[in-house]
Amino acid sequence: MKVHNVEMIMSAVRPEQYPEEGYPEFALAGRSNVGKSSFINKMIGRKSLARTSSKPGKTQTLNFYKIEEQLFFVDVPGYGYAKVSKSSREAWGKFIQQYMTEREHLRAVIQIVDLRHPPTADDCTMYDFLVHYQIPTIVIATKADKIPRGKWEKHKKIVRETLEMRSEDPLLIFSSEKGIGVEEAWKEIESRM
Ligand code: GDP
């Protein structure tokens, strides 16, 4: 998809604030600092519409980005940031959990992981949750520019095995830095709209 028109329409803190257009929604999940904002910005062709998180874990809102009057990217607060207090972590859990399990417009969760390293325990917890609730997931392994192309397959295998990925879930290589994987990611998203 060639993106011309993006509108950051709202930060929701309650379900009543979710948009009502009825467009398909794709939620973005990832560990703080994994490269989630960079992924969103690359996909929509903007430098910094999605803010790159200087204070990980701080945002407790769902940010809806309306794209081409066709779909929404829903940015979810980064997980796995140790300094977030227990109570705010629980609030994160409940709010996000409710969105992901009850939202009828949600087509898939796009989970961002770092291709360089095996997924962390937090990554696995997130993915297990998605499996448990039978939520279709597209796993994006980003920062691919940081490792040689010849090693991509080996790293992909480690990601797939560590997360114990469902065979039907795609795992795509990505780099926001180099623009690798943008078309493939859009193809995957569009096939689910
Ligand atoms: P977020 O907290 O998950 O939203 O992460 P950000 O998008 O803010 O990225 C965290 C850091 O990783 C920033 O310094 C980015 O410049 C860097 N980064 C993100 N994506 C890539 C990538 O594809 N390649 C490289 N080399 N660096 C990246």
Image (cartoon, helix red, strand yellow):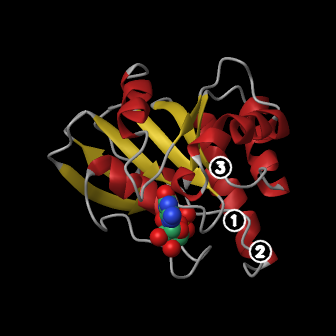
Image spot of residue 60 (x, y percent): 56, 68
Queried on whether the Cβ of the residue with tag 3 lies below 8 angstroms from ligand 1, the answer reads no
Residue type beneath disc 1: Ala
| Mark 3 Cα-neighbour bin, 10 Å: few <14, some 14–19, many ≥20 | many
Residue type beneath disc 3: Leu
Comparing 58 with 110, the one in front is 110
The residue to which callout 1 is attached is 91
Quarter of the image for residue 79 reads bottom right
Contact flag, marks 1 and 3 (Cβ < 8 Å): no
Contact flag, marks 2 and 1 (Cβ < 8 Å): yes
Check the image and report above or below for 53 versus 170.
Answer: below
The mark tally for this picture is 3
Please give the name of the residue rendered at 78% of the width and 76% of the height, measured from the top-left corner.
82
Q: CA distance from mark 2 to mark 1?
A: 6 Å
For mark 2, give the secondary structure. Answer: helix
Q: CA distance from mark 3 to mark 2?
A: 31 Å
Please give the name of the residue rendered at 35% of the width and 57% of the height, measured from the top-left corner.
41
The residue to which callout 3 is attached is 115
Contact flag, marks 3 and 2 (Cβ < 8 Å): no
Residue 150 in sight in this render: yes
Residue type beneath disc 2: Ser
Comparing 141 with 37, the one in front is 141
The residue to which callout 2 is attached is 87
Image spot of residue 142 (x, y percent): 55, 50
